[in-house]
Structure formats: structure tokens, C-alpha cells
Image (cartoon, rainbow, N blue to C red):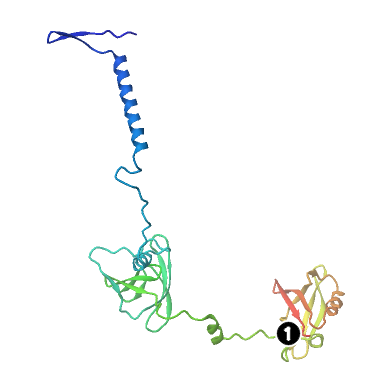
Amino acid sequence: MRFARENFVFSGRRLSVPSLHDVLWWALAIAIVWLAAAIVWVLVTPVSPLGAWRPRAVHVMPEPARAAVFASVDPFNRQAKPPVRKGQSQSVTSLALTLYGTRGMPGGGGSAIVAGADGVQQVYRVGDEVQPGVKLAGVAFDYVTLDHNGAHELLYIDQSKAAPNAQAVVAENPVAPPRAANAGPDALTVDTVRKGITFAPYAGGSGIDGLEVQPSGDGAAFRAAGFEPGDIVTAIGGKPVTSGNDIASLVGQLKPGASISVSVNRGGRQLPLAITLAQ
């Protein structure tokens, strides 16, 4: 395709319109010159055209400012404070209430453990009435918001006292150690079991399928072993009772320090028992 070149007469001179090829050639030449000048400028000038370049020093916030920033951020609750309605003010409540614990829930719900002047701790959910005219309005990480007759008041967890020492708490609340099997006059021994408990074959619908247990004497050994009147031993050590010979097997396991596991049918229910003998 060829483009025709038109001629114009201007002030007695004949002017010719440049072709599209000439226009593109000159535009490309100007772009090359401009890029070459930019490359030369980058090579012969410093990093910054305004002077020597220096890296900016790290800005470290003062300690009070850092403490204020971290104090305003709660990693367990993105909302630092519950929303305040327009026209409402928040202040620390003067009610005789003590906050012992909080549990926030997604969406603004949650519950809190609050005690009144009587010291009785109770669990309240958001919306519950803590006292007449006082409702739990919001739960945060370490405080709750109370709706006190339309005004929002804050109740914080008391952290003025040091945390209790675990060893001191254990020392103040001692737990009696469990009584050993061979301690006390009521401990089961081989002799007391043989004299205080009798076993007899029990015939069910299809022959002997259990051992009937009966107390002897004052019944102390019978009760200490965990038996009740009407119990039927259906298994000894996990093996079902199938004949009267299982009585000899049970008596043969009565040894000092032994623990014999039996299954008992009590009122139609199968219950596990363990006969633990003293040394």
C-alpha cells in the first residue's frame, strides 16, 4: 500500500506533507535519543539527584509509648472495648460486685463469674440480671460491661493481689491419702472372706450358670467386698461360671494381696466387682 503525498502552497512556497513512514521514523529516533540520555544520567549522577543517599535509621518507640500501644491491644479479643452507644459514658462501677472470671464468645456473647456482697459466686450470661436494675451487657478479656439503669459501667477482674501459690493452697487443703488395703480392722483378708462369705451353685434356665453369694456371721466381710443380698456371680476373672467346680477355682485365688475381679448379676444388671485382699 502506498500513501500519496499531497502538496500545499503557503506564501508562495510549495509545502509537502510528510509521509507516515517519515513520521514514525522521527518518533522512533526521538525515543531512542531520550532513552540514551536517561541512561547517561543514571550512570553519571549519584543515587539521588538531590545529594548523597543514606538509609533511614530504624525508629524505635520510647518505652512508655510501646507500653501504651501494647496495653491498648488485646490478642484474645480484637475489640479493645465494647461498643459505646452515642450519649453513653463508661466508668468503673461502684457496685459491691467482684469479677472472678470471663469467657467471651464470637459475636459479642459470653459469660462471667460474678459475686455479690455476700461473696457467693454465680455464672451470668450476657443479658442476665446480676442485681435489680443491673444487667450483664458485654464480656471482654479482663472486664465486663454492666448496664446499670441505662448507663454502662465497667467491672474489672481484681488483679491487685498476687496470684495464689499452688503449694500454699495444697498445704491449706490437705487430702487424706487413700487407706491401704491392709489398714484398719475392716480390711478383707483370706480368713475373713472364707468365714464371712459363702458361695453356692446357682441353677438358671439351662443348668448352673452362676454362684449365689450369701453373708455369714455379722456380714462385715460380705459388705466390705461390695456384695449385696441376691447377688449372683456370673464370671470370675472374665470367665463365665459354668459349674459348681468354679467355687474351688474362686477359693483357690484367695491369697494375701490378691485382687479378684468378678461379674455380678444384680437385679438383671451386670456389675463388675473387685475383691481386694490385704497382705
Q: Position of residue 119 (x, y in %)?
A: 41, 83
Q: Is residue 86 left or right of residue 176?
A: left
- Residue at mark 1: 181
Q: Is residue 91 left or right of residue 199?
A: left
At 53% from the left and 84% from the top, the residue drawn is 168
User: Where on the picture, by quarter, is residue 108?
Assistant: bottom left
- Please, what secondary structure does the residue beneath circle 1 have? loop
User: Where on the picture, by quarter, is residue 232?
Assistant: bottom right
Relative depth, front residue between 83 and 265: 83
At 82% from the left and 88% from the top, the residue drawn is 191
Amino acid beneath label 1: Ala
Q: Position of residue 172 (x, y in %)?
A: 54, 87
Relative depth, front residue between 75 and 230: 75
Relative depth, front residue between 264 and 169: 169
Density class for disc 1 (Cα within 10 Å; few <14, some 14-19, many ≥20) is some
Q: Is residue 162 above or below residue 80?
A: below
Relative depth, front residue between 239 and 37: 37
The C terminus sits in image quarter = bottom right
Q: Position of residue 142 (x, y in %)?
A: 40, 71
Q: Position of residue 94 (x, y in %)?
A: 30, 79
User: Where on the picture, by quarter, is residue 243?
Assistant: bottom right
